[in-house]
Structure formats: C-alpha cells, structure tokens
Image (cartoon, coloured by chain):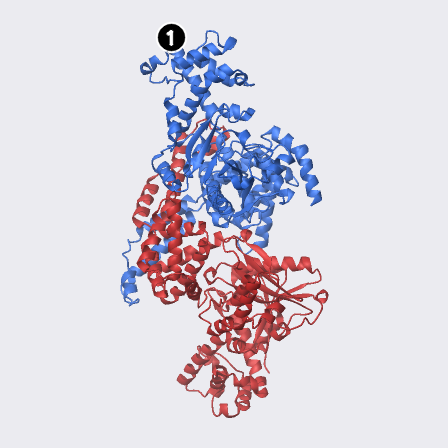
Chain colours: A blue, B red
Amino acid sequence: MSRNWKGLAVLMRTPMRAAASQGKQLPSPTPFHPIPTNASSAGDREEISASRQFAVAYVKERMQASISIPTERFESLDANLEEFSKGYLSLPQEGRRDLLHELARNYDVNRMRVRQLMQQYLNLGFPSNAEDNAIDNEQSGSSLHDEALLASCYRMERNLRDVLRPMYGVLFERLNAYDGGLKILAVLRADVVSLLEKDNLPSLRALDSYLKEKLITWLSPAALQLHQITWDDPASLLEKIVTYEAVHPIRSLQDLRRRLSIGRRCFGYFHPAIPGEPLIFIEVALLKEVAKAIQDVLWDDPPIPEHEAICALFYSISSTQPGLSGVNLGKFLIKRVIELVKREKPNVMVFATLSPIPGYMQWLLSKLTSQLKFTELDTENTRNLSESDSSSTFKESIFFPEEEMLVRESGSDLTDGKSGIEILQKLLSSPNNEWIKSDCLLNALRPPLMRLCARYLLKEKKRGKALDPVANFHLQNGAIIERINWMADQSEKGLSQSAGIMVNYIYRLEKIEENAQSYFSCGQINASPNVHQLLEAKL
Amino acid sequence: MSRNWKGLAVLMRTPMRAAASQGKQLPSPTPFHPIPTNASSAGDREEISASRQFAVAYVKERMQASISIPTERFESLDANLEEFSKGYLSLPQEGRRDLLHELARNYDVNRMRVRQLMQQYLNLGFPSNAEDNAIDNEQSGSSLHDEALLASCYRMERNLRDVLRPMYGVLFERLNAYDGGLKILAVLRADVVSLLEKDNLPSLRALDSYLKEKLITWLSPAALQLHQITWDDPASLLEKIVTYEAVHPIRSLQDLRRRLSIGRRCFGYFHPAIPGEPLIFIEVALLKEVAKAIQDVLWDDPPIPEHEAICALFYSISSTQPGLSGVNLGKFLIKRVIELVKREKPNVMVFATLSPIPGYMQWLLSKLTSQLKFTELDTENTRNLSESDSSSTFKESIFFPEEEMLVRESGSDLTDGKSGIEILQKLLSSPNNEWIKSDCLLNALRPPLMRLCARYLLKEKKRGKALDPVANFHLQNGAIIERINWMADQSEKGLSQSAGIMVNYIYRLEKIEENAQSYFSCGQINASPNVHQLLEAKL
C-alpha cells in the first residue's frame, strides 16, 4: 500500500502534470461527447504497456485464427485471443488502421450465402398460425403440415440471423467472453471512432455501429457496480480518477483529497470485466444553493456543514473509455446517484449541474466568420447590419445596434473603424483573452454573449438534437436548462470553450421522464423562463 | 448476523429436510443435465416470494407494454418491467404456460416485413469491393457509385438483422438491462424448458434457443466472479449452498461446516446481476489418491493433513439455475478452480472427479424390458440367448452364459425358473434394493453390471454425444473416463441411479484440449484401458 501511495504521490508531482499539459498524449476523455476527438489516444497509452512490438501481419493472423478456431479448441482459442490483444495494443496507429480496415472489409457478412438463404426463405410458403389448434386440442396432430412449415420458418430465420452476423461479430463475442477482452473491445472501438473521422467509409461505419450495439448489451447497467470512491480506495484506483478527470483537472494530491472528503461525493460505475477502473465517474458537491460559478464549488474547505445542504451539484462527470461513446452509462449513473444521495441526505431537494458549454465559442466564431463574408458581399454599410437583416436571408443579427455601438466604443485601440463583428471576432480569438481584463469590454460583451449563448443552447441543433454535446446529454436524461451564468469559469479552458459562461441543468425528478420524452419525440429543448427571456434580452 | 445464523440453524433443522424430501417443491437442480426435468420448480419457489397474486391478463399487458414503450420513457419502462417480473413470478404454472405460448407465437418475427426487406435487398446490385481503391488513393472519390451501393448494402443488412430479431428479443434485452431482470430471464427459461417437455412446439423451441443464445452472451465468463465459499460467508449465501447442493445433499449444519473447512474447498461462480447466490458451485476434497467411493470423501475429519494431498477430487458440482441449462458455466468453473488449486497447492498433480452416473439404471431397465419382449417373440430357449445373438438383430447379449447361471443360482427364492434378464429386472426395480444385502448376489451381479455400465458410458450415444449427461459434461470439457467403481455410492439415490456404481473422470491438463476436440469432432469417448477392458470382461 505505502508503495502505491508513493507511486501516486510521484504521479501527482510529475508524470500527471506532464500528461495533463500534453493533452492528446493521455486518453483525456471528452465527457459526454458522443465522438471523442482523441479516442485513438486510449490506444496510444495502452501501447506503452505492451511488452513487445508485434508485426501487423502476425496480429492479423491471430485475428483470423481467433475467428476461425472451433470453440472446443478452447486453449488455442485463448492463446490466440491473448496474442491478438497484446499484438493489437503494441501496434502503432498505422498498423491499427490497416488491421481495422481489413477487419471491416474482409470480415463482414457473406453476401453470397445471405442471398442463397433469402431465396430459400422466400420460396417457403407463408405459414398460417398452425399451432393455435395444436395447442387448443393438445396437439391432436391437426394441421401437421402447417406446423412443419412453421418449424422450417423458424429454423431458416435462425440461420438467417447467423449468416447476417458479420464474421467480426465472432471475434467480438469471443473477446467479450475472454478475460480482459472487453477492455480490448473498448480500445478497438475508440480507434474505429477516431479512424472514422479520417476514413469515413461504409464498411467502417457498419463495423462501428455493430460493435456499439454489442457493447450496449454487454455493458448492461444491471451488471454495473456503483461504488463511492473515497480516500480509502487503493491508489491505483485514485490514480485513474486523476488521469481521467476531464472537466476540472485535479491539480494536486491535496485537491484530490478534498474532492473525496466532507461536503463532496465521488461515485464510479464499475464493470467486473474491467476491474480496478471506473467506466465513468461523477463528482458531487453538497451546497446551500445551486452554484453560479465553479469557484463556488472547488473550495478548499466546505463552506457549510453537510447537514445544511439542500442541493447536490454535479460539477464533473467523466467517462474513462472513449470507446464507449454512444453507450450512455452517464444516464444510469446520474439516476443511481440521485437515489443514493436522497437516501443519505433526505434534506437535499435540488439536483443540479454546473456544466461547461464545450461547443459555444467554436460555433460563435464560425458564425462570425460567415457573417463577415456576407457583409463583404453586401453593398450596405455594416453599421446598418441589424436593419438590413430582412434584406439578406443569410445574415443574422449578432448585435442590436446599441450593443454594437457600445462594443466599438469600449474597445479602445482594438476597435478603430471596425465593425462590431470584426471586433468581437478579434477579441474572442485573441489567445490571451485580454478582453476579460477590461470592465467596460466585459459590460459591453455580456449582453450579446449571454443572448447568443442562449441561442446556441436553445436553437442550434444537429439531427434534431441540441448541437452542444453536454446539453444533449443532460436534455436526453430529462434535465432542463435552468440558468446561464456569466463569468462562471475564468480558467483558460473555460474562456476559450465558452467565454467563461457555464450553465446549470436541473433534474426535477417528477418531470425528468416527461422532459426526456418531449426532447426525444420532437426535439423540444426544455428551459426555464429566464433562459428563454435571454433570447430577446437587450441592454 | 446472529439473526441470520438463527435463520440458517432453523433452516437446517426443519424446512431444509422437508424441502429435500419433497424434491420437486425445491429447485433441486439436476447438475450438468442439459434439460433439467424439474426446471419449472425454480418458478414454483419464486412464486412463494411474490407478494400478491396477479391476473394473467394483467401480466400480459405489462409484457406487451414492456416491449412497446419507447426507451426514453425509462420510468414507465422500469415500472412495467417490475410489474411484469412480480406478476410473472406470482403466476401459477397454468398462467405461465399460457403467457409463454402467447409470447412465443405472437411476439416472434414480423414475417411480412422480413419478406419485404429481403425483396429490396435482393433487388440491390451485388457490390464490388468499392473501397479498395477508395482507401488506397485516400478516397479520391473513385467508384463513388459502388461505394454508395455498398453503403446501402450495409444499411439493409442492419435493418434485416433488426427485423429478424423476434419481438420478445426486445423484452429479453430490456430485462437484461433491468435490475433483477437476469434472474427473471433464468426463471422464464426454466419454465420454457420444462414446458417444452409437454408442448414441444416450433414456436417454443425457437424462443428457447433464442433466449439460450442471449443468456450465453450475457453471462460472459469474463464477467463472472469466482469466490471461495467459506464458513465466514453470510448465512444467506450458505443457505443457498444447502438448498442447491444436488449431488450429495447436506444433512446438517455440521456437515455443511465440514465441507467448507480443512481438507476441502468450495468455489462458486457469481454474476453481479444475480448477487448473493452462486450460479454454479463446486466442492473439492484434497486427498492422497483418487477416491473409489463417496464414503472416502464425505469423511467427518480429514484423513490426511492438506500438505500431503496430491489429488484434488471434484466430488460435487451443482448449478443453481435450471434456466441456464445449456449455458456451460461448469466448464469455465473447473478450469479456473484447477488453476487456483494448483497455485495454492503446488503438490497437487491429479485433478479428478468422483461422479454419479444418473442415467445408467434408467437405460439398463428399459433395455431389459425390450430384451424380454424380443425373447417372448423368440422361439428359442432364453438359456441359449447369448448364442442366438447373431440370429436376432434386436437381441443383445446382457449376460454371458456363466454369468446368467450364477445369477439364477445365487438368487434363492427370487429366481425360480426365471431367465437371468427377468431376475435382473426384478432385483434392480425392487424398491428396497434387497440384492445388495446378499453377498453371493453381489458377486454374481458385479461382472455384468460393471460391463454393462462400461457399455453405457462408452457406447450409448445421443446425437453423437455420450447419452449420460454427466459423462457428456466432463468429456466435452476434455476429461477422460478413468475408472468405474463398484459399490461406490450405496445411498438409496446411488443404488437407484446406477446400482451404486460411480465413475472417476480425470482432467489431464496437457491433454484436455485434444480430448475435447476428438470428442466434439468425431464423438470419440476417451477412456483408460481398464475401462475398455471391462467391455470384454468375463468372470
């Protein structure tokens, strides 16, 4: 144990920081994000742990064998699965890409066979429900022909299911049954997901969705174990928390300890086939009210005694397996955690989050750029932008005129003779975020940035769902957008992601199902009146 | 805890005995048996625990709803699954039969839809491997048409998989994801299995094999937890061991304690979704040699200190879930246990079993009956039976002439003027097993009964596999038939199952895969020379 602790201490001093700063080198998971941008790095990391380097050809052979070996040769099968796993982890990205493409293209379904079976099936008659009589008069042998027909229908349907299962389905099934195989499947999926961003090919998409479906049934929430992570847990586990905390990085051993002690809770979901590391974990703070800024949560000493708390604030939720993106474990985790906290602290009535808005700035800056393009094309003077809205279908109001004026006046040298949009673009894309140092700029920017944020959260959609991944996550779990908070996270990350704005989502237990349903069925984004008002808000 | 213990003690005094004697009332599981004869009783037992009685119609509604409710209405879904589970367990056998037939017949695949999709699929062209170029020259947009075709192939194949999934597949998936659902699925399967013995209908068979496949993937051995069961485990768990021990019933708290202490081991396989009860467990004795009789194993005090042991004898393996028949967990359990014991006791070299032969007497008695029929038809004198074999294809030699003579002479009044076969039949079917009380009968019967037992184990097959379920279990795991032991289990059960004969199977680690493979591929039953010799053995 003491050795472990030394390990963790060391880890906190150097490697973790290093890793944290390197970002991509670590599987720093993108919380909630349906498709982690750096999924492959999960693989990169495993690589290091792999003992020796394998040749791609060799790993492919082991893959081939792992699919074709008959089940009764269980030892050879295990040996092959082990070699494949080790080998896959040892492969550099290029090798994995090569192998995954081969798996996706050459180990899918046998279309010849599928077509044969379909023909046979279609040539069968259409069975009446032969059995009804059979049962009613205890199989008096009536309509035996129909029963035989029905029997062959069932048989053929079973065969069709088998032959429609891609060959790589066998590999996945066998890895799932093999010790440590589920972890390999997660790494493999992470690689597929990131590979899809480069090579978006039908075969890869098919493999991805097939594997995702399988992971969903294999990671049944009923088989997941909820564990409250405390300072008494093994260092090897706490190390994982430090590594994977994606929302508000853990800076020191002290910081870690605080997150696990009085006034806070940390819960992880564990699967027996991936022991010693949570698949996803959530950090909770017990508060007197819903916090407006992250500083109100990341305190050093609890501001209130626990028994005074009436709000449980979820301030961080991180999934550790990029390969499980799209497998919504967070939904079940939040449900279970709410139940647990209610049982432990009956006074806690409010369950809310203080969440980042990871997509806001990215969306806004691209919108500003496109607006500038239109404006150039436009004969009109940019000062009349807002009035000329109607004239151009592509142009959208970014500012109200008064707002723009204020921005242009407030921004000292930055702003000479430029349009509000240009100024805004320049301010927001300047690396060192100078703008937050000037009070009058802050005042000038607050109304438009808050309004545009409300617009981003309430109006911007992708396939009928909220564009922002965190918003989509909480909305589909049945939360509502309660409040948008100005200057809630002034960390570099917070400013570059969302101009320092954060949002509170609230889980109203009696309404979550209703909310989730309206969101699913008609993409309705549920928000408090205050947030809706922001859309129209002027100075 | 103390309360628990009182509970267990009470349990040991009365209910357990009662239950044990009642047999069918308890889910006394049939170890290894691919189709437990009393599977339904698992349900019977649950019934008791169900709080109130539900109407079949109501349970069917909940079933219907559990299938049709959209996922995002997770609360209603959970509520329905709970009501369905409670309701199902509360139903009497008739109600369950009714419900299962409805599920099997009215919730299978939508054949109309299947045929439509197949037609569409067949009308699609046959895709070339469009992507090869696409990848090689980084998607230069070459052969875009083919790629589109391929894409729609994958899409349709996915849809076909969906529509070929029976509707009850949705119910199963959802139960698997629901707390306590896996247990319900096991009970449900147990009922299906026993129902099939009465109503062997295509729809039920299809449902059974579909559910079995699902249970196999959901009960991945990688997710199972091996736990050594000791006297320190909760009474609630030990109670289960007492309840489910199927091979050598546990008679007292003392007996239970002995099986968990020095010289013995007990290991169970647990699944997180079915907490607090093993799915299967095995009892091991540490010995100086492979035991020939069960008395040599069920000792009160260890005959040798553990460090002198060189043999680990598996003397009992019981599966607790009749609904998991055909899901071979025992195979993985035995592998894991062998590894564990080897690590703990490096001196242990021999891994063997002392196993019952549950099907022997049943097989032999039916053979005797049929032989008697043939003999009646036969003009010849039964005394010449053995000589006349060649003349009648149906007749088989039961006795060698000398043997028959000996039997007829030894059997005092029982045997006047009857044929050896008649005598044998009478002796073996007499309820109180008089025959073992006469030494000369024992001597007379030993050679034929041992030879016929060897024949039953080595020659009698069902679908190319050993007819005896226990033999089939160990042979497919790669064991060989090492030795057949006379008067190895003189308990009432032992005598009526197998005339008191038991068999040692041996697991030779370096050979198990080879053995398993030859058994699977060509049904070869591997046995020691001694056992083969028994086939020819005379007096």
In the picture, measured across the screen, residue B306 lies left or right of residue A296, that is right
Find numbered disc 1 in the image and state the secondary structure of the residue it sits on: loop
Quadrant location of the C terminus of chain B in the rendered image: bottom right
**Vertical arrangement, residue A205 with respect to residue B102, above or below:** above
Query: Residue A490 placed where, x, y %?
Result: 54, 24
Query: Residue A282 placed where, x, y %?
Result: 53, 39
Give the residue number, with chain letter if any, for mark 1. Answer: A381
Query: Residue B404 placed where, x, y %?
Result: 53, 86
Query: Residue B464 placed where, x, y %?
Result: 48, 64
Kind of residue sitting beneath label 1: Asn
Q: Please name the residue shown 71% across and 70% down the image.
A: B304
In the picture, measured across the screen, residue B436 lies left or right of residue A122, that is right
Q: For this rendering, which residue is in front, B226 or B134? A: B226
For the image, the number of numbered tags is 1
| Residue B8 appears anywhere in the view | yes
Quadrant location of the N terminus of chain B in the rendered image: bottom right
- Tell which subunit mark 1 falls on: A
**Vertical arrangement, residue B368 with respect to residue B513, above or below:** below
| Residue B125 appears anywhere in the view | no
Label 1: how many Cα within 10 Å (few below 14, some 14–19, many 20+): few
